[in-house]
Amino acid sequence: MFDAPSQNEASALAKALRLNRRQLFAASTGVAAAAAVTVPSGSAEASVGSSGSGRIPKSKRGIILYTVRDAIARDPEAFNGPSGFREVFAALARIGYKQVEFAGYTQHANAPGGAQLGTVEGAKQLRKWLDDNGLRAQGNHGFIPSSWPFSDADLETFKLHTEIANILGMQHIGTGADPTSSAVKADWDVAAEKWNALGKIAARAGLKLYTHNHDAAYSFLLDAGPKDAAGNPTRSSGIRRLEYFLKITDPKYVHLEMDVFWAHVAQYKFREYTAADGSTRKDVFDPAATVLSANSRFPLFHAKDGEPDTDVANGYDIVPFGTGQIDYETFFRRVGRTDTRNPMVEQDTAPGGTTAPAQSLQHARLGLQHLATL
């Protein structure tokens, strides 16, 4: 089984990840402690608050299961390590996580419960494993109807997902996709109408509906200037797509999950726009300010780290949480109310394949240790 790495293993991992001196100390001394979930009296974790500071309360420290998708998808009959939901839940609980966000409900067919757990009975099984390990589910990157107005089939499928979410004890239900991939204002108007309707359905089930967004959703809306051949505007008033979406959706029904990494990519990429008069205007995106402008509408975050790299289009490379240069200490202090936020550690590149099958859980350990000591 893959439990906490030894001190030498953690040190080697830290060096391979190019950690600075502070991060190296954390990796070599704190990772194993996080896995054992032992909190010395007077430690940073023991003194974590639960109000408006930048500290993340222990109960709010989560991870999206996409980070460890390789472990969930592994064949337990062919691999001597955590495989499938049940064993991965146990491993994450040993590390010290208290919350998980799902990225679908499928696992390897040989894992307990079978391949597909996205059913009422499957959800009951997942809930038992969550409860057995002291974990709470907070959301899912799941089904959002493609039709609008909704087809009967799409509507029934979405209602089934709200039922599954309730069985799992979630407070939120969402998707990993933008409301629309378009930059045109009219398309965001339609998306807002659809999401308001979905949000009302979710609210009747006691859930908050959320959309998870990458960098493009923080680019500038096309809502001004000359029209193209299709009659769509080709320039911008300077409002960003998601800022407009927040403005025209009902705050009671529509919420967002900010992926802080992709928000910083947007800060790097989308720094100017063409105004209605054809002039170029500069406007640098501030992720924390966007959260504060609609404070109650950001209940979830993805805590994903990045190392600056101007040789790539995004301006950052994804690295294990706590080993990059995104200043989460300042970000969480600025947005405050950490007792009502749910940060989920995510690393798209965590799976190590056949050459490093334990890597995603090792990186999950590093992520939890950093989240606990911000």
Image (cartoon, rainbow, N blue to C red):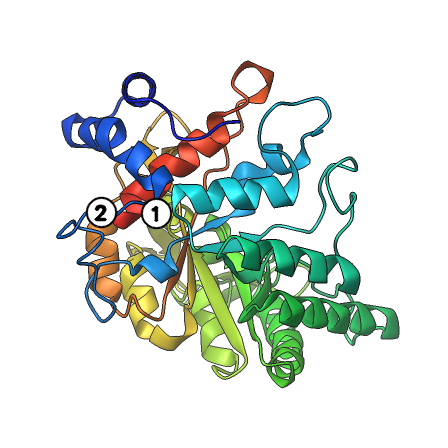
Report whether 326 appears left or right of 102: left
Q: Is residue 346 above or below residue 76?
A: below
Can residue 220 be seen from the camera position used here?
Answer: no
Residue 299: name its quadrant: bottom left
Instruction: Name the amino acid, label 1.
Output: His
- Spatial separation of the CA atoms under disc 2 and disc 1: 22 Å
Residue 208, percent from left and from top: 54, 74
Which residue is at 71% across, 41% downward? Answer: 107
Q: Is residue 366 left or right of residue 117?
A: left
Which of the 4 quarters of the picture holds residue 284? bottom left
Describe the element under mark 1 as helix, strand or loop: helix
Q: Residues within 10 Å of mark 1 (few under 14, many from 20)?
A: many
Mark 2 or mark 1, earlier in chain: 1
Image vertical order of residue 87 relative to residue 148, above or below: above
* Label 2 element class: loop
Answer with left or right where residue 70 lies relative to residue 120: left
Q: Amino acid at mark 2?
A: Thr
Residue in view at x 33 percent, y 29 percent: 310
Disc 2 to disc 1: CB gap under 8 Å: no
Q: Nearer the viewer, residue 37 or 369?
A: 37
Graded by Cα atoms within 10 Å as few (under 14), some (14 to 19) or many (20 or more), the crowding at tag 2 reads some
Residue farthest to the left? 42
Residue position for label 1: 264
Which mark's residue is nearer the viewer, 2 or 1? 2
Q: Residue at x 31, y 23 (%)?
A: 10
Look at mark 2 in the image and give the residue it sits on.
373
Q: Nearer the viewer, residue 54 or 71?
A: 71
282 sits to left or right of 226: left
Nearest the eye: 53 or 246? 53
Residue 289 got which mark? Answer: none
Percent of width and height locating residue 44: 17, 50
